Amino acid sequence: MASTKAMNPPRRECRQCWYHAYASREAHAGLGPREDCPECVDHMVNGHPEHMIVR
Ligand SMILES: [Zn+2]
Ligand SMILES: [Zn+2]
């Protein structure tokens, strides 16, 4: 189970990145130990989509 903190990012944080940072075990469950998460990489390369930022 993801923690309450992981599910409740503060304002101006990216929901996806917050969740992946605080619940990385759940969020990255399908990845190998040294495998990059495509969702995290996408945000690192392209930035965080406006609709994922907490208002
Ligand atoms: Zn990720
Ligand atoms: Zn993000």
Image (cartoon, helix red, strand yellow):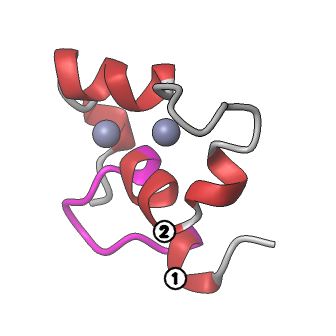
Query: Disc 1 marks which residue?
Result: 5
Residue extending furthest toward the front: 34
Which residue is at 29% across, 27% downward? 43
Which residue is at 46% across, 25% downward? 36
| Left or right, residue 40 beside residue 7 | left
* Mark 2 element type: helix
Residue 46: percent from left, percent from top? 20, 15
Residue 47: percent from left, percent from top? 18, 26
Q: In which quarter of the view is residue 12 placed?
A: bottom left
Q: Residues within 10 Å of mark 2 (few under 14, many from 20)?
A: some
**Above or below, comparing residue 1 to residue 42 in the picture:** below
| Left or right, residue 12 beside residue 1 | left
Tell me if label 1 and label 2 are in contact, CB under 8 Å: yes
| Left or right, residue 18 beside residue 55 | right
| Quarter of the figure with the N terminus | bottom right
Residue 55 vs residue 34, the one in the foreground:
34
Residue 15 vs residue 1, the one in the foreground:
1
* Mark 1 element type: helix
Q: At label 2, which amino acid type do we have? A: Tyr
Which residue is at 29% across, 48% downward? 53
Q: In which quarter of the view is residue 29 placed?
A: top right
Is residue 43 covered in magenta?
no
Residue extending furthest toward the bottom: 4
Instruction: State which tag comes first along the sequence, 1 or 2.
Output: 1
Q: Is mark 2 within 8 Å of ligand 1?
A: no
First to last magenta residue range: 7-16
Residue 35: percent from left, percent from top? 53, 26
Query: Disc 2 marks which residue?
Result: 22
Residue 35 vs residue 16, the one in the foreground:
35
Q: CA distance from mark 1 to mark 2?
A: 7 Å
**Above or below, comparing residue 19 to residue 53 in the picture:** below
Q: Is mark 1 within 8 Å of ligand 1?
A: no
